[in-house]
Amino acid sequence: MQNHPASNGNPRNPNSLHYIDPSGRLNSYQQAITEIGEVIQFYDSDRRFPAWGFGGKTFDGTVSHCFNLNGRAGGFEVDGVEGIMAAYASALNNVALAGPTLFGQVINTAARIAGQSLSYDRSKYFVLLIITDGVLTDLQETKDALVRASDLPLSILIVGVGGADFTQMEILDADNGRRLESSTDRVATRDIVQFVPMREVHSGQISVVQALLEELPGQFLTYMRCRDIKPLNVQMAQTCA
């Protein structure tokens, strides 16, 4: 999932985080998609990924905070990391960047998919990847969405690109030992957010694998153990595949 906020500037401007360089040099978002995709794609057996954008004036002229990145009305899945990259490049040519930047709708969309899976396969677990420049308009609505989603088989990786102030992302990560609270004072069932600033990865402070997988396995195990969901044995899993 990619964020297209107006704060990133025109993609034809070399100063924009979304700048498409004619020389083929990857921009900050393309770097993040490639580096992170190379790690997490192996956790999806069919390598087909839902891909949404937010903060864009879409094909019909309306500003959307959750639109199919590939531009198709019927389907939001793309094939592999290459499919995400192609959909992203296509969207930049067809979608005008527009504010404000809102996370709530994409989190609710991912939560709906995770919730629906419970009716047919309780062993499924979902990871939503959000790539953002860190400027968020709907902080409380995002907290509310995360608290609601904390009961579902879902984790959210927020990856920060550029040099912005990521204080809001640190708040959502809730690594201070206090779980997120909603506007109705409901406390999250568990922590489902992991925030990774790419500048720390590129500076060599942490590896991309270490950054991405620091909290995710624990979040997955906490969810499964609380619901007493046991892993399929290997032979059975191969039969089902």
Image: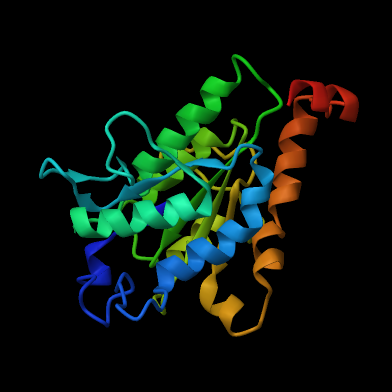
Residue 20, position in %: x, y? 30, 72
> Residue at the spot x=74%, y=48% of the render?
217
Res 188 quadrant in image: top right
Residue 168, position in %: x, y? 44, 63
> How many numbered marks, from 0 up?
0
Res 93 quadrant in image: bottom left
Question: Going by the image, does 113 lie left or right of 93?
Answer: right
In this view, the residue farthest toward the top is 119
Residue 167 versus residue 154 in the image, above or below: below
Residue 79 versus residue 137 in the image, above or below: above
Residue 143, position in %: x, y? 45, 46
In this view, the residue farthest toward the left is 61
Question: Going by the image, does 231 lie left or right of 220?
Answer: right
Residue 143 versus residue 194 in the image, above or below: above
Residue 5, position in %: x, y? 27, 61
Question: Going by the image, does 72 lie left or right of 86?
Answer: left
For the residue pair 234 and 151, the one nearer the viewer reads as 234
In this view, the residue farthest toward the front is 23
